[in-house]
Amino acid sequence: HSPLYNLLYSAWLSLVPSFSAMPSYKLTYFPVRARAEVARQLFYLAGVPFEDVRVPHADWPALKPKTPFGQMPLLEVDGKPLPQSYAINRYLAKEFGFAGKSPFEAAWVDAIADQFKDYNIELRPLFLVLMGFAQGDKDQLLKDVGIPARDKFFGILEKLAKDNGNNGHFVGSSLTWADLLIADHVKTVSIHLPSFLDGFPTVLDTVKKIESTPKLKEWIEKRPDTKF
Amino acid sequence: MPTYKLSYFEGQGLGEVSRQLLHLSETPFEDDRISQEDWPKRKDSMPFAKLPVLFVDGKPLPQSLAIARYLANQFGFAGKTPFESAWVDALGDQFKDYFSEMVPYFMALGGDNEEEKSRLQLEVAEPAINKFFSILEKRAKDNGSNGHFVGDSLTWIDIHISDHMGVGEKYFPNAYAAFPTVLALREGTVSLPKLKEWIEKRPVTPY
């Protein structure tokens, strides 16, 4: 080949993303949204292919001892396992640019996610009954557990969204995995407790804006439909 | 350099890992210890009405793991690659899960019902410790028994677990006897000169 050809070819190679250098990704979880949905959304938003493995509940016991913590979701990057949903979410978010624009912003994304986790722990007795995993008095649990937990956490979110200028994000001015986490939860709540979050209009508005992100909207329309 | 203030209760608990990161990196900070009496007055000034909170040039950051990770990233205690950092995070989250399982036991320790303490130690603490520390033991071994849970340098999870074990042993002697690699990791961590120095001079608190 001529020197010009070689020069042009090298220039082209340096500009084209090297797909052979991209790791292979596999995400393994139950056939629900819950703790794997944010990771799935991050892959889709980034346009990165991944193996979306959904394990039927009956198949889980055999798989469990093969996982590092006996739990799912599990991410495998070139076959190397990484457990714990938030570690997975943060890792992918950092790789793909959904972790905030500064270290302090990224830390606030983490803080909101951990506060959401605390809220979920408080909400758990109610949610187990709503999902049909436990017996209980739904109305009593709503009053004793659901409403206090909601008011505490969504009060925080409402203020964060307002203080952030109602710009469609809970932190900063770009989509982060905390936005995705909250939006997916709001979706699940709207299925099971339709008017539960009516007292938090800025949060609901923020979630609407998040869900209208084009690639996310596309994913939501085509993903398997699950109750949680 | 930014100014740092760490606000937490008087004990080790969920704030000590961050104090230790600041000491290890020789970063000056205000160690703002809030008594139980003063907490109601201070609560509303904290973003999530909880402690710890880190103030960086006066801007607050809540949630203990977010704070620890932020400081660890600033000072080089968060692993050497993104995947290593993610494994440190995974262990941190597994610790958080274990900690929340232990809460009924911790609450009983705060009271004086000895029967309840014994019962919860057997029914709650032992299974939770067994589950989590088995993971840690395997992790420490698989990592080459090199004194670290992840990679080959000190990370915030080495610091956090080591500190927690010191508190646990006050109430449950030999709680971790079945986990020798983890015990060795802890010994290595707390004997690091700058950490040893801090541990020797810090206020002694019940937890």
Image (cartoon, helix red, strand yellow):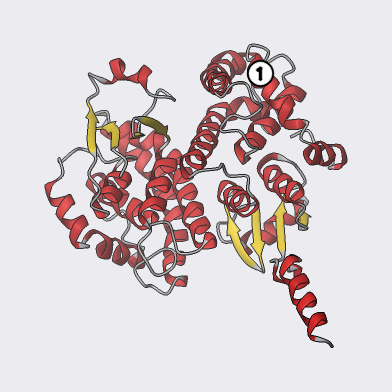
Q: Secondary structure at mark 1?
A: helix
Picture coordinates of residue A148, whole percent (x, y): 53, 16
Q: Nearer the viewer, residue B74 or B103?
A: B74
The residue lying at 29 percent from left, 15 percent from top is B41
The quadrant of the image that shows the N terminus of chain A is bottom right
- On the question of residue A137 being in view, the answer is no
Query: How packed is label 1: few (under 14 Cα within 10 Å), some, or many (20 or more)?
Result: some
The residue lying at 52 percent from left, 21 percent from top is A156
Q: Is residue B39 above or below residue A220?
A: above
Q: Is residue A172 above or below residue A189?
A: below
Q: Nearer the viewer, residue A38 or B170?
A: A38
The residue lying at 76 percent from left, 66 percent from top is A16
Chain for disc number 1: A
Q: In the figure, is residue B71 to the left or right of A191?
A: left
- On the question of residue B69 being in view, the answer is yes
Q: Is residue A17 above or below residue B50?
A: below
Furthest-right residue in this view? A222
- Pointer 1: what residue? A138
Q: In the figure, is residue A208 to the left or right of B97?
A: right
Q: Nearer the viewer, residue B143 or A203?
A: A203
The residue lying at 75 percent from left, 31 percent from top is A211
Picture coordinates of residue A217, whole percent (x, y): 81, 36
Q: Nearer the viewer, residue A167 or A219?
A: A167
Q: Amino acid at mark 1?
A: Lys
Where residue A187 sits, quadrant-wise, is top right
